[in-house]
Image (tube, coloured by chain):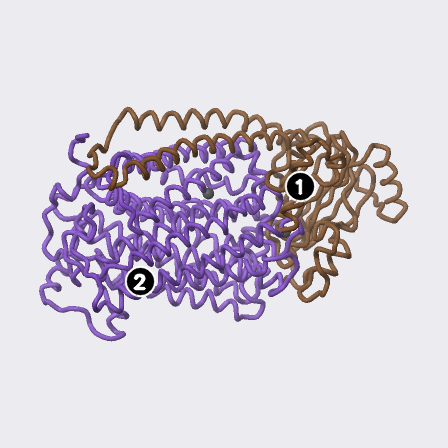
Chain colours: A purple, B brown
């Protein structure tokens, strides 16, 4: 019914409203996609500033700028802002823009919910960031919010908890919307196995979100009642157990890791075939690999808890299940490389970021495999080795995929080509300096530096200096990216116009509409031409 | 860059076999890598770490070698006409099965080490370790000794914002304590780890031990150091304001020196009389190394964090 509604509406032939009300009242998936992406850009900037406070303080031993308390607050907020404000809304924004256009739908299935889901976010983050200005400041517990230490937070704790509730509502509405759109609004002939891999990855991500965001909401609600209503879920004096929180949190937290990487897999699976001029290798094994990773993500959570003193059989189980994830992840990497193999490769900016993703994400995967071995994790756990690991999968992993996606699709969104030279400069600075930031951190962790400390022993000085320099240069290089986006989005006059197909190797329904994509696309469902789903043809070498 | 050069120089010295007093500064020697440490556990962990490292290096060289070859050889200027192949069941089955077999090969020794790490039975000496914001408390029920181990005075002076003291002038900055844990060499030490307030983590890399400390619960860990020396570590679980200022120092000494140290500590007023139940708990081997609920939980929710060493 929703479909019919939107359909009729569109025939009224109205474009967007004008002024600020366009953005506040919009139910258009493209407008909301744009809003999500700008929102995440602002959050990346704020979260980035927090990380610069951390890196500046760690430039040399001794405290130079902040107290240990404020340092801890930065540690907490940097992660919360980057994960819930940066990465996740960016992927939701990309889903908003691309999923309807990829499956041949006129809009998202639930447009008003879509508007609500986005507009919750600015309020959620205002609440969360206001914790910095309350007496006692933000929680000093890290984003994992472990009790009892998080219960020592002052009056800001309920602000942060309600912010997390709001973000959870936003994520779940977004996820439901994507899932319903994919399952109900596909154009006739767009069978499941014809869907682009980005759509597949978001279908699975949507289910993960729906399954685990309530676990997070439950965990933080229990914190709230433990602090204010005298319950003892996590208080041993009342029969509770702090480790219960860890179980519930990581039951959310590990699938969350894949929520932040599966859409990236989808993006890379779109970009590499385009610039290899060759169909994606192993389409169906890619789908099965995503499904396998999603399933495994529910049964590995306690690998974050190897030092907790879990019973030996539990420790064994979580070690083996975690190691297993390497198999489907390996399949994805091999398939991408096989896609490039004997293609006809060119290296425009999106492809550069995609190749860097394959290379650097794998380095994060390798350290992940090492720390899956529980007895060695006794040494790695809570050191900079872990910090290096998850930043490799989140920055040159998830973030590079988001950047690649924006370069890849922005000509479609704006009708204007970005500046390729600036794009390449942005790429090389990012790719080099992200390694300057995080590669030395492997050594710091192995040499014995714990994470989340504001100050350190003298022998860790040199590598910390290198890392800090890298962080500042990496942050500064992102302004090239922002300028490049602004050029496309705002100053379109006299710039190179993008064709409908944009990239000669691109396939998929989104490339059959003009650039910029009209405000309403696919008001009449499109024909799904075999040309757009090349992986269904029989191989001919 | 001074430290870096010194570390490199030290590595060369070690290779030449002239690092005579290496045992006193193991952590500094292991600047780029895990130390192999001084316990059987730390050496097994180190072995697994190096095995996993070489496995991923070999896989990485093969996979990325292939990728970079393709990036070079199949770029459009050299390879203008793309192939169209996009499936090959044989290849896909092979690259699913081979990684699986490699994983099995890694899992077996890892499981063996894990079992070893959980075997806390037959200890020669049991020490109770209690994390308190932001110090460690050590109790030796069998010796009737109990004391608090906090950040040493020199680091405490240098650590705060605007202290005016250059940290590099402080020996073992943030890694020194007033009263170290002292253990005899070659004896199996069992640790009963708990907390009086929030979660902490007890970690000494050279001993191969990292275990979290929870209020109301007791965790077990063990080590048997086979070299005399001083081994340093830190709290590894973010425990609030003073988390970065909770170092751990373990001095491994000869049996004789241990007895002398215990007598001296008694003399200095660190003696106490453990309860019968405490002694019984210490001498029993009831449980297989996992976490158990403590007989008495800390009384209440902890007080709000205020000041710390770093303040
Ligand atoms: Cu995980
Ligand atoms: Cu701590």
* Front-lying residue, B146 or A354: A354
Residue drawn at point x = 38 percent, y = 66 percent: A122
- Front in this rendered view, residue A165 or A431: A431
Q: What is the spatial separation of the Cα atoms under label 1 and label 2, in whole angstroms?
A: 48 Å
Residue A494 sits above or below residue B77 on the image: below
Question: Which corner quadrant holds the C terminus of chain A?
Answer: top left
Quarter occupied by residue A58: bottom right
Query: Residue beneath label 1, please?
Result: B9
Image-based side of A285 in relation to B160, left or right? left
In this rendering, would B143 be left or right of A401? right
Label 1 sits on a secondary structure element that is helix
| Secondary element at image label 2 | helix
Furthest residue in direction front, as rendered: B78
Where is residue A308 drawn, in percent x and y?
58, 41
Question: Does residue B284 sit above or below A407 in this rendering?
Answer: above
Q: Are marks 1 and 2 in contact (CB under 8 Å)?
A: no
Can you tell which quarter of the image residue A306 is in?
A: top right
The x, y position of residue A320, in whole percent, is: 47, 31
Q: Position of residue B275 (x, y in %)?
A: 79, 41
Residue B226: x and y in percent read 74, 30
Quadrant in which the N terminus of chain A is drawn: bottom left
Which residue is rendered at x = 40% and y = 45% of the image? A255
Answer with left or right where residue A522 lies relative to residue B95: left
Q: Nearer the viewer, residue A131 or B219?
A: A131
Q: Chain of mark 1?
A: B
Residue A359 showing in the rendered view: yes
Q: Nearer the viewer, residue B39 or A276?
A: A276
Circle 2 residues within 10 Å: few <14, some 14–19, many ≥20: many
Residue that numbered label 2 is attached to: A485
Residue mark closest to the camera, 1 vs 2: 1
């Amino acid at each position: 019914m929703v479909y019919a509604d939107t359909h009729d509406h569109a025939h009224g032939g109205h474009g967007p409203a004008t002024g600020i009300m366009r953005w506040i009242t919009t139910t258009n998936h493209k407008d909301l996609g744009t809003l999500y992406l700008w929102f995440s850009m602002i959050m990346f900037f704020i979260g980035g500033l927090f990380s610069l406070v951390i890196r500046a303080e760690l430039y040399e031993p001794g405290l130079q700028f902040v107290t240990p308390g404020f340092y801890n607050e930065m540690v907490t907020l940097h992660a919360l802002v980057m994960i819930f404000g940066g990465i996740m809304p960016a992927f939701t924004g990309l889903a908003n823009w691309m999923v309807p256009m990829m499956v041949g739908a006129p809009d998202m299935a639930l447009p008003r919910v879509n508007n609500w889901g986005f507009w919750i976010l600015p309020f959620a983050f205002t609440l969360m960031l206001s914790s910095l200005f309350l007496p006692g400041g933000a929680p000093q517990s890290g984003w994992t919010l472990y009790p009892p230490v998080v219960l020592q937070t002052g009056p800001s704790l309920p602000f942060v908890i309600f912010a997390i509730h709001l973000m959870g509502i936003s994520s779940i509405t977004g996820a439901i919307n994507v899932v319903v759109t994919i399952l109900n609004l596909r154009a006739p002939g767009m069978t499941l196995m014809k869907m682009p891999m980005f759509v597949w990855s978001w279908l699975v991500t949507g289910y993960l979100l729906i399954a685990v965001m309530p676990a997070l909401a439950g965990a933080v609600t229990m914190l709230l009642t433990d602090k204010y209503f005298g319950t003892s879920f996590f208080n041993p004096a009342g029969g509770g157990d702090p480790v219960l929180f860890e179980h519930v949190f990581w039951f959310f937290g590990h699938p969350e890791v894949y929520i932040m990487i599966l859409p990236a897999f989808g993006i890379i699976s779109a970009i590499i075939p385009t610039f290899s001029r060759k169909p994606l290798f192993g389409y169906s094994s890619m789908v099965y690999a995503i499904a396998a990773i999603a399933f495994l993500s529910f049964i590995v959570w306690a690998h974050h808890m190897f030092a907790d003193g879990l019973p030996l059989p539990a420790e064994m189980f979580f070690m083996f299940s975690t190691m297993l994830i390497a198999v489907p992840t390996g399949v994805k990497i091999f398939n991408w490389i096989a896609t490039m193999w004997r293609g006809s490769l060119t290296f425009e900016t999106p492809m550069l970021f995609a190749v860097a993703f394959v290379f650097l994400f794998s380095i994060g995967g390798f350290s992940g495999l090492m720390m899956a071995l529980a007895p060695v994790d006794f040494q790695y756990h809570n050191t900079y080795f872990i910090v290096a690991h998850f930043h490799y999968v989140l920055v040159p992993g998830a973030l590079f995929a988001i950047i690649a996606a924006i370069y890849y699709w922005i000509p479609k969104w704006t009708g204007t080509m970005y500046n390729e030279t600036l794009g390449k400069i942005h790429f090389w600075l990012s790719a080099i300096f992200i390694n300057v930031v995080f590669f030395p951190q492997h050594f710091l962790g192995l040499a014995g530096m714990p994470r989340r400390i504001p100050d350190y022993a003298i022998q860790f000085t040199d590598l910390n200096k290198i890392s800090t320099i890298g962080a500042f240069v990496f942050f500064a290089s992102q302004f090239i990216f922002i300028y490049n986006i602004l050029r496309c989005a705002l100053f379109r006059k006299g710039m190179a116009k993008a064709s409908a197909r944009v990239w000669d190797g691109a396939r998929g329904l989104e490339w059959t509409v003009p650039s910029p994509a009209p405000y309403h696309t696919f008001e009449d469902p499109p024909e799904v031409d075999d040309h757009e789903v090349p992986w269904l043809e029989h191989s001919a070498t | 860059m001074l430290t870096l050069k010194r570390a490199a120089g030290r590595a060369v010295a070690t290779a030449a076999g002239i690092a005579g007093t290496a045992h006193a500064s193991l952590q500094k020697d292991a600047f780029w890598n895990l130390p192999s440490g001084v316990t059987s556990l730390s050496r097994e962990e180190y072995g697994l770490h190096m095995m996993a490292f070489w496995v991923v290096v070999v896989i990485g060289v093969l996979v990325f070698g292939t990728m970079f070859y393709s990036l070079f050889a199949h770029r459009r200027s050299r390879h203008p006409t793309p192939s169209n192949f996009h499936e090959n069941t044989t290849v896909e089955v092979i690259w699913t099965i081979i990684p699986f077999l490699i994983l099995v090969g890694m899992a077996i020794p890892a499981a063996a080490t894990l079992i070893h790490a959980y075997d806390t039975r037959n200890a020669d000496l049991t020490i109770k370790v209690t994390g308190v914001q932001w110090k460690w408390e050590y109790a030796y029920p069998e010796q009737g000794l109990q004391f608090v181990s906090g950040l040493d005075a020199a680091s405490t002076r240098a650590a705060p914002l605007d202290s005016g003291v250059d940290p590099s002038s402080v020996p073992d900055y943030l890694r020194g304590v007033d009263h170290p844990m002292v253990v005899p060499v070659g004896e199996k030490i069992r640790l009963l780890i708990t907390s009086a307030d929030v979660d902490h983590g007890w970690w000494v890399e050279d001993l191969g031990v990292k275990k979290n400390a929870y209020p109301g619960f007791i965790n077990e860990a063990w080590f048997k150091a086979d070299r005399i020396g001083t081994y340093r570590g830190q709290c590894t679980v973010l425990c609030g304001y003073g988390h970065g200022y909770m170092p751990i120092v373990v001095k491994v000494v000869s049996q004789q020196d241990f007895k002398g140290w215990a007598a001296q500590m008694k003399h200095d007023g660190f003696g106490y009389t453990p309860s019968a139940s405490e002694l019984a708990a210490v001498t029993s081997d009831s449980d297989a190394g996992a976490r158990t609920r403590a007989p008495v939980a800390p009384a209440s929710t902890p007080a709000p964090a205020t000041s710390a060493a770093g303040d």
